[in-house]
Image (cartoon, helix red, strand yellow):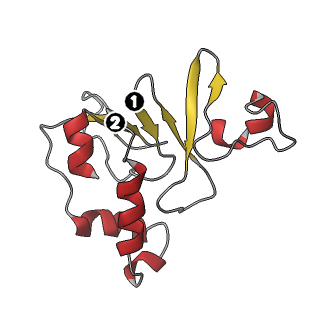
Amino acid sequence: MVTHRWRELGAVSNTSMGRPAWGQRFLLGERKFEPVQMAVRVIITAWLYEPASRVLFTSDFFAHLVCPSRELPPVVTGSEPVPRGAEVSEHLRTKCEWPADANTEPIRQRLEMTFIGREAEAIAPGHGCAIGGTETVRRHV
């Protein structure tokens, strides 16, 4: 997984730390990526934004969408309904219990801030369905 291999990738050349600062872009192959400070951390990982394709890679977050059939592409577009908050909350509770009792307003605010200055055309979680299309991304955020 890219987020766990900063040193191997040679992401930062002018520091003794192997992990770039949030927002500091690095080259991986022919693509530039930007580490994004995530709104909420469910597991120890990082989010990456690839500005050329406008894809936000979110590790385990936004992984609540599942493909109903193997025949369908694993990408949610504008034609599918957006899950209700209760459905997303139920999925999060399978991973951890704290969201049920937490004040989630600061998390919502940080999530909104993640998208300021980053036009995401897709959200790509580590599993589950990707979210495709700028308007679809906005509806799911």
Q: For mark 2, what is the residue? A: 119
Q: Secondary structure at mark 2?
A: loop
| Front position in the image: 63 or 4 | 4
Q: Which residue is more in the foreground, 2 or 38?
A: 38
Does label 1 or label 2 sit earlier along the sequence?
Answer: 1
Residue at 42 percent of width and 81 percent of height: 102
Any part of residue 68 in sight: no
**48 horizontally vs 11: left or right:** left
Q: Nearer the viewer, residue 19 or 95?
A: 19
Q: Would you place residue 105 above or below residue 138 in this image?
A: below
Separation of marks 1 and 2 at Cα, in angstroms? 6 Å
**Percent position of residue 59, x then y:** 51, 46
Q: In which image quadrant can residue 27 be found?
A: top right
Q: Residue at x 35, y 65 (%)?
A: 108
Could you classify mark 1 by the number of other residues whose Cα lies within 10 Å: few (under 14), some (14-19), or many (20 or more)?
Answer: some
Q: Amino acid at mark 1?
A: Arg
Residue at 31% x, 48% y: name it. Answer: 65
Q: Amino acid at mark 2?
A: Glu
Give the vertical position of 113 relative to 18 (above or below): below
Judging by the rendered image, the residue that carries numbered circle 1 is 54
- Determine whether, in the image, residue 74 is placed left or right of residue 41: left
Q: Is residue 6 left or right of residue 138?
A: right
The secondary structure type at the circle numbered 1 is loop
Q: Residue furthest top?
A: 30
In contact (CB < 8 Å): disc 1 and disc 2:
yes
Query: In front here: 66 or 54?
Result: 54
- The count of marks equals 2
